[in-house]
Structures are given as C-alpha cells and as structure tokens.
C-alpha cells in the first residue's frame, strides 16, 4: 500500500467538509482524504480494498462490503448506537463498525483510530510529529502520602501545558481527581502498556486513541487496582515509546503508587519533584528518602526539586528556573 486513503461519504456536504478539515488538522496518520455526497463517486476509485470508508448509514449498501475492507458507518439514530457493540465482521477480511454521527470530534476520532489499528500495512511514512527535541520526563514522588501529590502534579501539568505539548500520566489506583479518573469501560495506562507489548509498530496510533484532553493538557485516564501490577520495566518502556512517537514535549508522571523497581523508574526522570509538609513526620520521611537516593550509585540528586506543599504556588517558577540553568 503506497498511500493511505480515507473516504468520507455523506449526503450532507457541510458535514463532509467539516470532518475533512477536522481530520486534516487532528489525525497524525498521513491520509489522502476524499469526500463524496453519494456512492456514485466511489465507483472509479482505485485501491478501494485498502481504503478506510467512513459512510453515512443512509448511503451504506451491503454490496460495498465486496469492494471495501474497512468500513465505518455513521449512525444517525441514537437507538442504533451501542458503545460496546462488537465489530460486525462480514468475513475474515472485512470489518464494519458503527459509531454515532453526531458526537464530539474527539470521540469520532477515536472510532477512526480503532479502525486504523485493524488496517494491515498502514503506511506511516510522513506521520505528523510535534517535536524533534528530547522529551522531558517530570516525575512526582512523595514519601509522605498526605501531601496531595495528585492534585499538585495535575495543577503543575496544566500550567506547563499552557506553554508546550504535555502528557499527564497518573498511577494512583484510588485517584480522587474526577476530571482524570477513568470510567470502568475507558481505556487507561494498563491497556496502553498491554498494547505496547503486543504491537509496537502501531503503538503511536493506540497512544493517540487512548489519550484524552483537559483544556490544553493531554492525559491518559487513571486506572483502578490493576495499575498496581505494573513495574518499573513497564513504565520505562512506556515512556521511551512515547518519546519515540514524538507526540509530546514533556510527560508529567505522578508516581502515587509504589511498585517493584520504583527507584529505577525515578532514575528515568529528568526532574524529580518531591513534596513535603512542615510536620515532623513528613520531614523525617523526606530525610530517610533523601538518604536512600544519595546512597544509590548513578542517581543524580541535582535533578530533584523539594517543595513544601505550603508553597506550591511558586513550584512552576522554580522548575522553569532549574530548566533554564541547565540549558
């Protein structure tokens, strides 16, 4: 397959144009996009079997399944839509999936990316990248679990996202931040790690599918108890694969849960932010953790920012100052 072809077929010309414009702006996969308001325009197309056809339910005909292998039908009747409805497979070579026509652009994009994951031989030459620089990894780990680490790391990530393209990852199995807490059926960091182990070639597509937005911040929905099964090797492999995708300038990762090989994962951070409060217990735990880090060969303690939770309003300024000094 020399080129990726995506076809939009809908009787509403305005909808076709808006979806065309949205996909050209948002999807990273290099597609040649064509739009038609009727099935007549599909007759003379070449390479139909390799194309992704996005078609209105009003225009879909069964015979199209003999020409196209990848078909996404846009349902207009809410009653016909089922979120966990499995793909309807005409045979082993043809995949037909349904998705609501009237939904948010991000949700429609995820449906399209799901189809892309099933297209063999997808050409990723010329995939859109967002940075050519080394991705910065900013880790939060706090030995005192009363320091509101998740709330503070999320606030920090939101501020950083106003200046650059940032991905926020949280491994708190009991995350209380509703805006990033994943629902039961939502894909999360555990799914991302699993997919990475299954298909590295299409990881960046799945990453784009799983990632959600909160204003200008990108984030991966938090997972429940299963996140406790992940270890340092999983996190390190995940971060390196995200960097290889060239999708983000920085990743802010909130290590709320401890796990096997935690120190190895913290070594991967370009900056490690440790929060504490003024209580004697918090100070003691911080001191013990600092002693542990100082005793580890190869751990660069100069990359650590220690910050009192009573002064976190100036945390971002401190981080920016540290980065500029290192440049």
Image (tube, grey):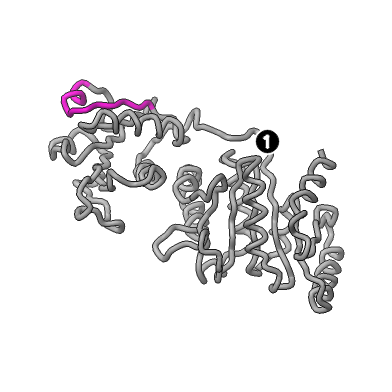
Q: Give the quadrant of residue 105.
A: top left
Residue at 81% from the left image edge and 45% from the top image edge: 321
| Of 13 and 61, the residue lying toward us | 13
Residue at 29% from the left image edge and 33% from the top image edge: 15
Magenta stretch bounds: 32-44
Residue at 45% from the left image edge and 36% from the top image edge: 26
- Vertical position of residue 301 compared to residue 24: above or below: below
- Vertical position of residue 290 compared to residue 316: above or below: below
Q: Give the quadrant of residue 236.
A: bottom right
Mark 1, secondary structure of its residue: loop
Residue 33 lies in the magenta-colored region = yes
Left/right placement of residue 33 relative to residue 321 reads left
Residue at 44% from the left image edge and 47% from the top image edge: 209
The N terminus lies in which quarter of the figure? Answer: top left
- Vertical position of residue 28 compared to residue 322: above or below: above
The 10 Å Cα crowd at callout 1, few under 14, some 14 to 19, many 20 or more, is: few
User: Residue 222: x, y in percent?
Assistant: 52, 62
- Residue under pointer 1: 133
User: Residue 174: x, y in percent?
Assistant: 55, 71
Left/right placement of residue 304 relative to residue 228 reads right
User: Residue 294: x, y in percent?
Assistant: 86, 63
| Of 119 and 293, the residue lying toward us | 293
- Farthest residue in the bottom direction? 281
User: Residue 250: x, y in percent?
Assistant: 65, 45
Left/right placement of residue 301 relative to residue 189 reads right
């Amino acid at each position: 397959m020399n080129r990726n072809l995506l076809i939009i077929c809908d009787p509403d010309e305005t909808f076709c144009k808006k979806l065309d414009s949205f996909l050209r702006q948002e999807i990273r996969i290099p597609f040649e996009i064509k739009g038609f308001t009727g099935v007549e325009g599909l007759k003379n197309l070449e390479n139909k079997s390799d194309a992704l056809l996005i078609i209105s339910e009003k225009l879909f005909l069964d015979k199209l399944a003999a020409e196209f292998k990848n078909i996404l039908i846009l349902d207009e009747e809410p009653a016909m839509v089922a979120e966990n409805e499995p793909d309807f497979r005409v045979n082993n070579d043809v995949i037909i999936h349904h998705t609501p026509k009237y939904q948010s652009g991000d949700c429609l994009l995820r449906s399209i990316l799901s189809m892309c994951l099933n297209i063999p031989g997808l050409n990723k030459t010329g995939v859109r990248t967002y940075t050519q620089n080394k991705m910065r990894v900013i880790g939060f780990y706090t030995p005192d679990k009363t320091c509101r680490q998740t709330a503070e790391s999320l606030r920090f990530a939101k501020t950083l996202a106003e200046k650059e393209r940032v991905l926020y990852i949280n491994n708190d199995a009991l995350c209380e931040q509703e805006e990033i807490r994943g629902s039961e059926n939502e894909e999360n960091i555990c799914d991302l790690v699993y997919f990475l182990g299954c298909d590295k070639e299409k990881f960046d597509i799945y990453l784009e599918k799983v990632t959600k937005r909160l204003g200008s911040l990108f984030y991966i929905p938090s997972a429940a108890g299963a996140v406790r099964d992940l270890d340092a090797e999983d996190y390190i492999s995940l971060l390196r694969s995200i960097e290889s995708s060239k999708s983000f300038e920085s990743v802010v990762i909130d290590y709320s849960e401890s796990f096997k090989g935690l120190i190895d994962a913290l070594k991967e951070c370009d900056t490690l932010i440790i929060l504490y409060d003024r209580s004697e217990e918090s100070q003691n735990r911080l001191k013990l953790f600092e002693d542990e880090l100082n005793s580890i060969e190869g751990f660069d303690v100069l990359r650590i920012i220690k910050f009192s939770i009573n002064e976190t309003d100036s945390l971002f300024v401190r981080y920016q100052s540290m980065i500029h000094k290192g440049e």
